[in-house]
Image (cartoon, helix red, strand yellow):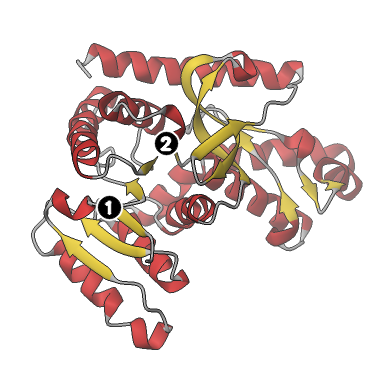
Amino acid sequence: MRRKIALIGGGQIGGVLAQLIAAKELADVVMVDIVEGLPQGKMLDIAEAAHIGRYDSSVNGSNSYEALENSDICIVTAGVPRKPGMSRDDLLSINSKIISSVAENIKKYAPNSIVIVISNPLDAMVTLMQKVTQFPHNRVIGQAGVLDSSRFATFLAWELNVSAKDVHAMVLGGHGDTMVPIIRYANVNGVPAQELLERKHGEKAKDILDAIIKRTRDAGGEVVALLKTGSAFYSPAAAAVEMAEAILKNQRRVLAIAAFLNGEFGVSGYYMGVPAILGENGAESVLEFQLNEEEKQMFEVSLNSVKKNVEDMKRLGF
């Protein structure tokens, strides 16, 4: 029997998720959204391309959470983006209410699933998801580092004029302005990226690298500024599918995800972006490595940002 992925949220990310999962024949897909007709229409559109795309995955839309039954993975994109005039507390409050409701229904209808949270503010929302579902921490994870790492690798590839496929780079920490790109280990098929930049640009290499790091941190906002009416959806969806595939196929991929820390990297009791092994049980273990002093300082700043998000969410009653 084919596995099943449930998508909670029928927006732009949800639509691309459904299309990618179906095209890969990774699993049968159901999309759940409260807007009548929206998930049904999007999934019918994708189903009608099955002949062209040569895929047999079952794709269905529903307005009922009962459709989550027997899901192996639930990918959560539900929530609203921050709009002009909306305070950070407004966003936290609105999305916390939405995620609380989603979590209750996942707990009820898909109690054995692994949950991947994409909704923002990510670090707080994945924390709330685990709190409400009471699932083991390894079965509730957040998508952030896979996307941020891909952006970092892409920008390095552009600067070095090489294929992005051959650039390996990792971004840790919270999903936001304080994320921590680890340049020390970034490489082009084993060749240190920093050394290549220095050979190409000499003394200007540091300034160029700083600009790449800043662009990585601001990448989501750059897309928002260009689109004007929305936020990124192709790349977040692709990142979540990579995580889901690692889980369903028990690939034991090492990916940067928002995982719950129990002392790793000196952090206990918080979700943070770290390298973790993803397999059939979700986040099976965190791969800890030694950070240098500069990286430790950046990681600490990022941790404090995550703590503030979580504390503000609790202050608002969640």
Drawn side of residue 157 relative to residue 134, left or right: right
Residue 176 versus residue 227 in the image, above or below: above
Q: Which residue lies at the image location 53% right of the left edge and 21% below the top edge? A: 261
Residue at mark 2 to residue at mark 1: CA–CA distance: 15 Å
Please tell me how crowded label 2 is: few (under 14), some (14-19), or many (20+) other residues with Cα within 10 Å.
Answer: many
**Residue 55, position in %: x, y?**
40, 79
* Residue 34 screen position, x and y as percent: 12, 51
Q: Quadrant of the C terminus?
A: top left
Q: What kind of element bears circle 2? A: helix
Work out which residue is located at the far front of the displayed protein and give it.
Answer: 1
Amino acid type shown at disc 2: Arg
For the point 44% across and 37% down, the residue is 142
Q: Nearer the viewer, residue 196 or 132?
A: 132
The quarter of the picture where residue 173 lies is: top right
Is residue 308 depicted above or below 41 in this figure?
Answer: above
Name, please, the residue furthest toward the bottom.
Answer: 51
Q: Is residue 169 above or below residue 268?
A: below
Mark 1 belongs to which amino acid? Asn
Determine which residue is flagged by label 2.
139
Percent of width and height locating residue 102? 21, 39
Does residue 214 sit above or below 165 in this rendering?
A: above
In the figure, is residue 174 to the left or right of 104?
A: right
Instruction: Residue under label 1, please give it.
Output: 70
- The circle on residue 259 is none
Secondary structure of residue under mark 1: loop
